[in-house]
Amino acid sequence: MRRLPARTCYWILLFILVVIFGPIGCGDDESNPTCDPSCDADQCMVCRDSTCVSSCATDQICDNGTCVEKTKTVSPPFDLRAESLETSIRLVWQHAEAANFRVLRRSESEDEFRILPESTPGSKSFEDMHVLPGKTYTYAIVALLDSQESEPSDEVQARTTGEPADWTLIYFISSDGDYGYDYWFNIEGLEAQGGSSESIHVLVLYDGFQVGDSRYYRLGGSNLSREKFTIPTAPDGEVNMGDAQTYRDCIDWLLPRYAARHYFVSFHNHGGGSVEPGSPSTGTRLIHNMLYDQTSADSLDPDEQGQVIAHLAREAEQQVDVVESMTCLGQMVENTYAMAGHARFHVGAESLSYVSSTFPVAYLRDHPQASAEDVATFLVDDHHQGMVAGHTPCAWSLVDLDKLEGVVDSMSSLAAGLLEFASTSENQSLLRELAGQAQNFQFYPGDLMSAYVDIRDWARVLSESADLPAPLVVEAASLVETFDEGLVLANRVHNDTHPGFDIEAHYDGAYGLSVYHPNLHQPFYQQPSTPPYAELSFCRNTGWAEYLQAISLEAPEGPCPKVTNLQTVLQADDAVHITWSYPRDQEPFYDGFYCSRDKDGVFSGVYFTLLKQAGMTDFEVVDTLDGPGVYTWRVTAVRFSDQEGSINWSTSEEMTLSK
């Protein structure tokens, strides 16, 4: 018999085995029919020994068909209890494992929990020091272990004991300014009115011009009852009054200790509006908005002021009743816009604001039932009376911040129409000229870099223009009507001569709120600081900066000539006439002058700024000597050099006179 080839025998044997035992396959094949039903790959299952098993290791779990590292489940804390103390709430809880913990708190006015920044890891207890008297708080605890967190514990509530005062008055006073002017007299003025009492807290954050003299104070009726506190976040005694965080730290420290039903905040120092003037000695910025801090070379911009007020409102769980900007050019829409929604009323000056001793302490003591509007109106009236008595021009007002939205919306709509209209150089020139006809405010009389217009008076000028298209006239008239619907609740003006300037101020067109708007003589000052004007929240949400940019002048390039023929003439009444000459220029509207004075080598006089008008070649200012000494006057010519606000200063000429 013939033998079959080995290969043939192999295939015959394989066929017999398949018939008897079925197809032979890999035990790891999830489609193997020996696993019935077939293994689910989405669950990371595979078939082994006719059984579906997980392909993941013991320290892994399946995640949509992929084996990943297993996360440990962290159990939530339990047995959470709360105890109300006089000025705090103490929490204790239990947990089965060693873990860190996160404390969650929700106040009566909040819908969501917030994570307390003071939450201490490791401990199973926590004392919440940042609570207000007479308030209910809800707490929960989350456990943290191996980068995992538990579900929140059961919630617990606690209500603080005690009653808040009627009013808390917070004064932010910066004497760390470039003028070397000490605002300590404000502290003495507050104490002269009685300081704090059971119903009123009078609190101060003070930063003097000496390094290391920053402190918190609770004022009494004299220096004997004055309480002084080291600032926890500044143990070296020096804070930056140009940093919003300085004020937030102050609020966080003061508020739990001195809570009240009503809050008043006052900002004290120099102010420069929403754009900043420059320094002729360095060619750099001098003041930006308010509370310039010379040590830190910083200052608060409008949005930062709004952030401070927003933080106080959040921590106090209510709107701030009254905000006062005791600064020059403080009543601007750029900063009131940033405070709207967080404060009820704002008191400030559209104009320059000279030293005032207006405080509401005695008024609140004599009128315990006074409303926030009553207090704010008193401040405007008292500031005005002080300026009249001191023969100082002023334009003080009270703005209802709840009414601001309609005015801003109307301004935004009008700015959009004006932007479209400003498509030709003739129309741009017309809009600049119209702005120049409205009530104007400047950092110094004739200042080159800052120009502000009263919003209502500017809209009035536009609404009466025969050169604007009818739709724009209607828009402008609508802005006037909206402005008059209760936005400004008190408005007081006084015309007089500026102290230190031989310039008369007329504020008859001041209606209570201004905005930055370069006029016929000025380019748009988009300063290179942070943030630029166009990035302020008011500009981002209105398109105002785009309108200004569209109508702005282009500043000339080239060197700025120095003044010539500088002379001083002393009169019998100690008046000094300072005169000089300057070459006539083809584009005269960009040139101006700064005149400063030193006495015995120490700066002792303000800067004079004068716009150079067309055709003028000779200039004069009048100063008055204040006693014997050696006086030196320096006159510097100024010219804008580009659209970014850089300034080209000439070399100064100086003249000395002895008396």
Image (cartoon, rainbow, N blue to C red):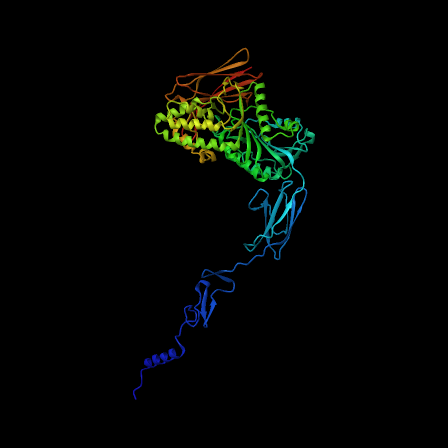
The quarter of the rendered structure image containing the C terminus is top right
Q: Quarter-wise, where is residue 565 in the image?
A: top left
Q: Position of residue 482 (x, y in %)?
A: 47, 29
Q: Position of residue 220 (x, y in %)?
A: 67, 31
Q: Is residue 521 above or below residue 76?
A: above
The residue positioned 70% from the left and 30% from the top of the image is 224
Question: Can residue 613 be seen in the rendering of this structure?
Answer: yes
How many numbered markers are drawn? 0
Q: Is residue 433 left or right of residue 492?
A: left
Residue pushed farthest right? Answer: 224
Tell me the quadrant of the picture where the N terminus can be found: bottom left
Residue closer to the observer: 355 or 454: 454
**Residue 306 image point, x, y percent:** 53, 35
Question: Is any atom of residue 521 visible in this view?
Answer: no
- Please identify the residue farthest to the bottom as the structure is shown: 1
Q: Is 313 on the left or on the right of 533, as rendered?
A: right
Residue 319 position, x and y percent, is 57, 36
Q: Say which residue appears at 35% left-offset and 25% top-offset.
A: 426
- Residue 98 lies, with reference to residue 410, above or below; the image says below
Q: Within the image, what quadrant is residue 556 found in?
A: top left
Question: Is 646 or 106 nearer to us in this picture?
Answer: 106
User: Which residue lies most toward the left here?
Assistant: 2
